[in-house]
Amino acid sequence: MNRTSSSRRSLIGAAVVAALALAPALTACGAGTDTSPPAAASPGASSTGAYDPNATIEIGSLYEPQNLDNTGGGGQGVTEAFNGNVYEGLFKLTDDGKVENLLATGYKVGADGLSYTFTLRDGVKFHSGKALTSADVKSSLEKVIGPASQSARKDSLSVIKSIETPDDSTVTVRLSAKSISFVYNLSYVWIVNAAAKDLATSEDGTGPYRLGTWKRGSTLSLSRFDGHWGTPATNKEVVFHYFTDASALDNALLTNAVDVVTSQQSPDALAQFTDNADYKVSDGHSTTKLLLAFNDRKAPFDKPLVRKAITSAIDNRKLLDSIWNGHGSLIGSMVPPTDPWYEDLTKINPYDVNLAKKELADAGFGGGFTFTLDTPNYDPHPTAAAFIKSELAKVGVTVNINVITADEWYTKVYKNHDFAATLQEHVNDRDVVWYGDPGFYWGYDDEQVIDWVKQAEQADSTDAQTALLKQVNRQIAEDAASDWLYLYPQIVVASADLQGYPINGLNSQFYAYGIKKSA
Amino acid sequence: MIGYLARRSAFLLLSLFLAAAVLFLLLRLLPGDPANALLSLGATPDQIAAARHQIGTDRPLPEQFAAWLGSLATLDLGRSFVSTAPVGPEIAARLVVTVPLTVLSFTLAVVVAVPLGYLAARRSNTWFGALLGALSQLGVAVPVFWIGLLLITVFALRLRILPAGGFPRDDWADPGRALTSLALPVVTVGLVMSASLIRYVRSATLDVLGSDYLRTFRALGSSFTGAMWRHGLRNAAVPVVSVLGIELATTFLGAVVVESVFALPGLGTLLVKGIAEHDYPVIQGVLFVSTFAVLLIGFAADLIQRIIDPRLRHNLSVEAR
């Protein structure tokens, strides 16, 4: 029972919460805050053991890119391989969730909060040799919001009204509405040479690596770009090895065919690494939440009391332990600890079978009821569904499990809202704002929350934004808008020879330029 | 013989056409919309329509089918919905793994099965023959991926003498490394294939051993080896060749299965990925090329049988008159 081997994050799951996201933890708002070039993003990275600057880092992953264009459906895989490695944005999201300057050296916001003027870093060159200019930034932004774009950031960046390029190193963007997450969202926009072609199979970015070869179905290699503007990568070459089978990936790590696995998806396999001095297991912070999402529009889940009762009837800790064996955490609402507006809200709807029974009786369902749970057919959803069914039977509620494909889920649940309750993983950070959209699939509709989310996006300071989103998070927990079953663990397993790899993997990125391999 | 070749070729083409039609229809019967694979969750109806138009699934089925047949005729397998890369070269790149895997596994199976099958027949009444029979039964019953996992555990994880999977990035630039990567998969498929092959070779040999003509030759004074060599082997080979044709095709399919276990970038893993992504051109392309290979093997087996066995040619010429 307790396995989620080869659980691929579904395309849908990965994309779900990508579209809207709120503000950066940006403190330095003025121009001239020159960030140091990319630094190693991680655990024990500071240790100064001798390393081989010409090493090849072999990375094992389950997420092969579909193509190499993140505005053309490249998917989670291309973000993992290319974000920050091959392409850079004006800003970058660090592994601990902060937004820092990257190709921009700073920006100014107009008094009305609607215009942003960015200053570009000097001396930046694309891999093709061309120098970075404001025209490249303009065309890259236009690509993301253009009609053909399949970018997950398209919606949130559609507040862009116009882009001007007064000179080669200045870009001015005007917005149609205030957007405090604008700069944060820009950390997802790759700056691509405006003249580059065939971006689905080749690249022209400014990052510390250029694309070596992509052998579809097997490997993708990156080699150090000597013309990079910043600190050179601490390794010469990075090779992503792609697997479709989680145990094949574990075997590769056990036989030293790969040095590090970007995201361990098979809890059963962990024991062989935790008890082994040749490997290091890092437990980072994930942003992936497993939700039991109710259809808040329809009876019986239109009543908050019913939703609270269901939430209290399910022992989330037991579920998490049976699937992840001690890894992962409970959060009690939508916000994970890496978001600035996190609070531990697990006390609001505690696991308490007697409370659940009382709430059901108060809501007029003392005799219980029956509902259908639409369950995606890949791990861990079927396991979680079976567990929920047995938990709810104890309070007189009967669950009919209806197993569906990701594709059916998309049509039935996401598009047509034709469901009573469903299970789904939501992978992105800063995605609590979806509760401010009554048109979203779960149909949570609370005027106060809608207003808070809107105000938060238009806030003048990150403090104001944080305060508002904390209120949102607490309110949806009090209404049990969904049942947030647990937060996934983010486990990176690496050879003990390796240092400087990212452990949180926020939004699937995997910065490789700081990885050092012992000489 | 020329008339036969012409008819057999026409039959091959007809089979190909039927295969193409069946493949095309079966894929379209699957639930789900391939356009979904291209989109993220926030997709608007406009974006969905655009995606359908981009991949051509908004056109009527007969039109899509005609377009596919047309491109097949020009040896163009289309472009992947998902990666937008052309499918033909992609398949060709994967054959670099799958074809050697198939051929080597098949060779191993034949090298193991023919002598063992022959011995099993010669010693059919001894403990040795019984043991071989039992082992081959067992081999037929065990799933191929299970053997693969077993071999990985022993040779890769415990003994550490062979890699657990993967294939060199530069393919066959270093043949030694490529062969090392293929060692365990080849043994896996080869062993399983030889199990069923042993049974065929054994029964074909038993038939010959019990035949009247062999007894007659022995009665005329030729040695057992001489009689077997001159007449027995050739007769036993006829049914074995037709079985070999089928077995080679099965080996190919077995190779496709073990590729996932050994993380080999071959046709099998391409197919699995294509199915997961609803990528019709990729699925169609792989299945079509596989079907073509299987039909071609059958074609070759038929021809070889005719060359070995004059009776088949003779029957044909009587018929032709």
Image (cartoon, rainbow, N blue to C red):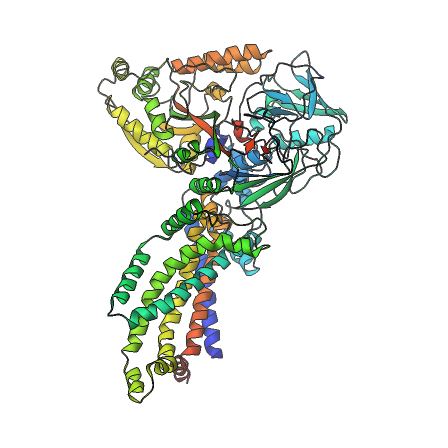
Residue visible at 42% across and 72% down in the picture: B302
Q: Quadrant of residue A441?
A: top left
Q: Quadrant of residue B127?
A: bottom left
Report whether residue A471 is seen: yes
Residue found at the far left of this picture: A367
**Residue A126, percent from left and from top:** 71, 35
Residue found at the far bottom of this picture: B220
Instruction: Identify the image quadrant of the N terminus of chain A.
Output: top left
Residue visible at 58% across and 54% down in the picture: B174
Report whether residue A416 is seen: no
**Residue A286, percent from left and from top:** 48, 25
Question: How many numbered circles are shown?
Answer: 0
Query: Image height check: is A29 above or below B11?
Result: above
Judge left or right: residue B22 versus residue A218.
left
Instruction: From the viewer's side, name the closer residue of A422 and A392.
Output: A392
Residue visible at 27% across and 78% down in the picture: B210
**Residue A359, percent from left and from top:** 28, 14
Instruction: From the viewer's side, name the closer residue of A277 and A446.
Output: A277
Instruction: Identify the image quadrant of the C terminus of chain A.
Output: top right
Judge left or right: residue A459 versus residue B310.
right
**Residue A142, percent from left and from top:** 65, 30
Query: Image height check: is A469 above or below B152?
Result: above
Judge left or right: residue A445 versus residue A37.
left
Residue found at the far right of this picture: A167
Instruction: From the viewer's side, name the closer residue of A26 and B230.
Output: B230
